[in-house]
Amino acid sequence: NTWTRQNAGLEKSPHKYNAWGFTLGGPLYIPGGFNQDKQRLFFFWGEEWQRDRTVEEQMATVPTAAMRNGDFSALLPGRVIRNPVTGQPFQGNIIPRGMISPQGQALLNAYPQPTPGFQQGAFNWIGNPSVFNNQRKDSIKIDWVPSGNHRVALRHTWAPNIWNDPEPMGVYSTIWDYPGRTMAATLTSTLSNSLINEFSFSWGTTSPSKYF
């Protein structure tokens, strides 16, 4: 548990992570025909999933129940609330109920209530909005051996990734969709007993982030 949560009397944040997948590979051949000796062409296919579930610790300063009703006496003597009409301080830093704007009060009530028993500096609210991260990797590779001195490898990976990003005080959570793709080609040549040459080409891209 973190010091902040333990000091506030809160339980340890939950965290659950799972990863699983499979691989499949071998020679590509046609019995009695192509690649009969199973030494020329090979394939590899792999799938991987990751699921991460946890919470994000957030702290904030939110209006107390008294402040939502115009009582800002807790801010004295450092912060004085003044009448916007006369410029004079409100007695006891308390705004008369008749002068409280319904719209302003509704805005204050949009904030969450302070967390009972929690106070760290100016922060009186602590929250733990849920966070998730879903990843998947689709990989396929082809190896071709045209001769004893040359080997060609082609690889493609598609990796979609969706995760969320909680905004302050858990008001809402932005969900991001950010897939990635990579491709690579390699030619390995044995030029002599003591000389090997490898030529590689790779390309990768990530789609523009989509969020909702």
Image (cartoon, rainbow, N blue to C red):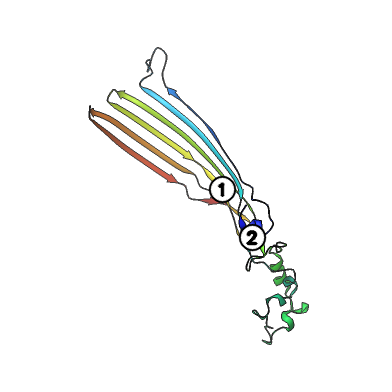
The residues tagged by marks 2 and 1 sit, at their Cα atoms, a distance apart of 18 Å
Rendered image: mark on residue 5 = none
The residue drawn where x is 68% and y is 52% is 11
- Residues 95 and 79: in front is 79
User: Tag 2: residue type?
Assistant: Met
The residue drawn where x is 40% and y is 29% is 142
Say if mark 2 contacts mark 1, CB within 8 Å.
Answer: no
Q: Is residue 48 above or below residue 40?
A: below
Q: Is residue 139 visible?
A: yes
- Residue 111: x and y in percent read 68, 64
Give left or right: position of 109 versus 193: right
Rendered image: mark on residue 169 = 2
Closer mark to the observer between disc 2 and disc 1? 2
The residue drawn where x is 48% and y is 50% is 208
- Residues 47 and 2: in front is 2
Give left or right: position of 29 versus 127: left
- Residue 74: x and y in percent read 70, 75
Give left or right: position of 191 versus 120: left
- Residues 75 and 42: in front is 75
Q: Secondary structure at mark 2?
A: helix
Q: Residues within 10 Å of mark 2 (few under 14, many from 20)?
A: some
Q: Residues within 10 Å of mark 1 (few under 14, many from 20)?
A: some
Q: Is residue 116 above or below residue 29?
A: below
The residue drawn where x is 38% and y is 23% is 41
Q: Secondary structure at mark 1?
A: strand
Which residue bears the numbered disc 1?
A: 163
Q: Is residue 171 visible?
A: no
- Residue 165: x and y in percent read 57, 53
- Residues 67 and 76: in front is 76
Counting residues from the N terminus, which is met first, the one under dot 2 or under dot 1?
A: 1
User: Tag 1: residue type?
Assistant: Trp
